[in-house]
Amino acid sequence: MEIDYLLLAEHAEVTGSKLYLMGGGWDTMSVPEAPANVRLMLAAGVRVEWDETNAPVPLLVRVDDEDAQEIFRLEGQMNVGRPPNLLPGASQLSQMTFALALKLPRFGGYRVSLTAGAEAAAIRRSIPFRLAQVTR
């Protein structure tokens, strides 16, 4: 299993095995003051190997500040099956989106991460972003 991609966006959804993004791929969010209540979308693609299908996979989404203090945590799971037309041994891309409503306490750096799997088999990918004050 591997995390193919992790993106921040203003809007993201998966429909018909396709990812649709609006305002995606940013790393700076500008607001007039902090603390700030913000809403952002996280889009992720997890590639699941043939032998990892039909089993629950724990997921963890975290947002940490620049001091590695947890701001937000969301736990869940995914379970990828095998469609009847899948070639033996083929991997599959499981795409997902997460809507995050956060209260970011101050301007500065943050990091959002996705962990898939448990303990020694867990994989993790993270991306940084900044909360900046609007300049006029």
Image: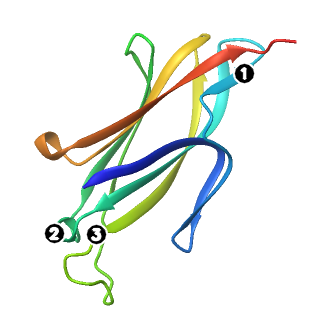
The residue singled out by tag 1 in the image is 30
Q: Earlier in the sequence, mark 2 or mark 1?
A: 1
The residue singled out by tag 2 in the image is 51
Q: From this view, report whether residue 5 is shown above or below residue 70.
A: below
The alpha-carbon separation of the residues under discs 3 and 1 comes to 39 Å
Position in image of residue 19 (x %, y %): 57, 61
| Kind of residue indicated by mark 3 | Ser
| Kind of residue indicated by mark 2 | Asp
Q: Earlier in the sequence, mark 3 or mark 2?
A: 2
The residue singled out by tag 3 in the image is 91
| Kind of residue indicated by mark 1 | Ser
Tag 1, which secondary structure?
Answer: strand
- Which of pointers 3 and 2 indicates the residue nearer the eye? 3
State if disc 2 and disc 3 touch (CB < 8 Å): no
- Residue at left 26%, top 84%? 87
Specify the quadrant of the image occupied by residue 108: top right
In this rendering, position of residue 110 left or right of residue 61: right
Task: Name the quarter where the C terminus is drawn.
Answer: top right
